[in-house]
Image (cartoon, rainbow, N blue to C red):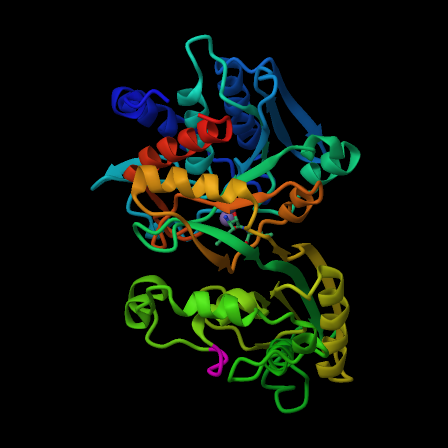
Amino acid sequence: MDHDFVRREEPRLLNELIEFLSIPSISTGTAHVADCRRAAQWLVDQLFHLGCPTVQLIEGDGHPVVWGESPAVPGAPTLLIYGHYDVQPVEPLDEWHSPPFTPSVRDGKLYARGAIDDKGQVFALLKAYEASRDSEGNPPINVRFLFEGEEECGGRVVFDLLAAEPERTQVDAVIVADMSYYAPGWPAVYTALRGLCYAELHVRTLQRDLHSGSYGGVAPNAIETICRMLMDLKSASGKIRVPKLYKSVEAPTKAEKKGWASLPFDEEEYLRDEVTAKALTGLEDYSIFERTWALPTFEIHGIRGGFVGEGAKTVIPAAATAKISMRLVPGLTVEFARKQLEKAIAKVAPDYADWEIVFHHGGDPVQVDVTHEAFRTLDRAFEEVVGRPTVAVRAGGSIPIVPELARGGAPVLLTGIGLPDDGLHSPNEKVDLQQVWDGIRVFGRFFEMLGGK
Ligand code: BES
Ligand code: MN
Ligand code: MN
């Protein structure tokens, strides 16, 4: 690999990354459909520019998928690179110190929505590919690029594509860089991702809103009712009251837990700098790693209903809605979670309430065996560039397509160049630029080593 690539090209690379991050490719909702397409087109242009003989913008029922194929390198293995160009919404906007789509460098960090999740990482992989090509523009291995625009919103386009054309994942290895280092200086590979089951619960207790003076004392309040139902679904100590849930969870092995116990971890620092709370909650009998990596969750994301305008309105609300989700761990599929959550709600719903649960998107959890030699190759690349091989950890988050990427039998390397305090999905999301430059070197060396160099 051209060892001077990053140093020499840094100003251009930074400009290109800023250009990519300036596109507000928010996939949820309908306001940014055209921007998502622009981000996809930006990737198409990059792949053309990098000399890929096959570049496709694949349409479906949602935001397009971008597919690219490197020139053929006979005899060399084939690596599939997956990433997503869509980003999360930016609210609350007034908490950003610089606008989310006006990328700004402060103190060696680039602040923008998508800086780390996942555009900055997609960018590092593309530039690693660029740097690893020889003077004729040929890479050391066969590369296929798969970039989707619906990872954050639960779209189906990439699922439909891989269901119709499973041969696209018939490769020797898959790499997904959409995660973080375990800690600064500690690169990671992930042995599991949690799944997700997202739903909206609608509750109605009256045909219309009522005067709270005339009827207060007898009329069932929809917000009170939905709150009681939600409180019944999880105890104050963090136990989720969904039938057969914990019984179905596959517990981590002793060896895995032992590995976690040997990771450097400072609970006070974690509480203060990452969680930013005064205290942790949840099942006290389990470690923080077990609670965030190996156990299911139940969260309330938002409650809507009643009067929330300026001033006061004395009203008993007739209807209320809550957005809720469960994170799923090995042993719990989306299908199972949906069925059991619906049963649990039926149990806690009072007779006087009409309710309906509407399931949105989801994803199954996934477990990855990290013994394949491709993982050792990645270790060597990290060791060479940043001085330490990966540690095996799990992730609390989800990437719905990963189970499909693994279906072809190829090892799936779940890794990334983020840092724990990057603030993905939060205001002031950032990427540490040194992580990007190192990441380009690491992935570039990884490609070369896979090609036997
Ligand atoms: N990059 C994240 C997944 C992630 C987060 C992995 C934290 C490891 C640690 C991804 O973009 C993401 O946010 N996924 C969503 C998926 C959901 C919308 C189906 C998530 O986990 O909420
Ligand atoms: Mn992501
Ligand atoms: Mn995300």
Query: Which residue: 43% across, 14% down?
Result: 134
The part of the image, by quadrant, that contains residue 133 is top left
List x then y, in percent, for residue 408: 71, 40
Residue 271 appearing in the image: yes
Q: Nearer the viewer, residue 181 or 22?
A: 181
Q: Residue furthest top?
A: 136
Looking at the rendering, the stretch of residues picked out in magenta corresponds to 282-286
The part of the image, by quadrant, that contains residue 332 is bottom right
Query: Which residue: 75% across, 35% down?
Result: 166
Q: Nearer the viewer, residue 282 or 19?
A: 282
Q: Residue furthest left?
A: 107
- Classify 92 as above or below 14: below
Query: Which residue: 57% across, 81% down?
Result: 239
Q: Nearer the viewer, residue 252 or 219?
A: 252
Q: Is residue 298 left or right of residue 379?
A: right
List x then y, in percent, for residue 51: 52, 13
Query: Which residue: 38% across, 67% down?
Result: 262
List x then y, in percent, for residue 272: 29, 68
Q: Is residue 215 left or right of residue 117?
A: right
Does the stretch in magenta take in 366?
no
Does the stretch in magenta take in 284?
yes
- Classify 391 as above or below 16: below
Q: Is residue 261 left or right of residue 32?
A: left
The part of the image, by quadrant, that contains residue 360 is bottom right
Residue 435 appearing in the image: no
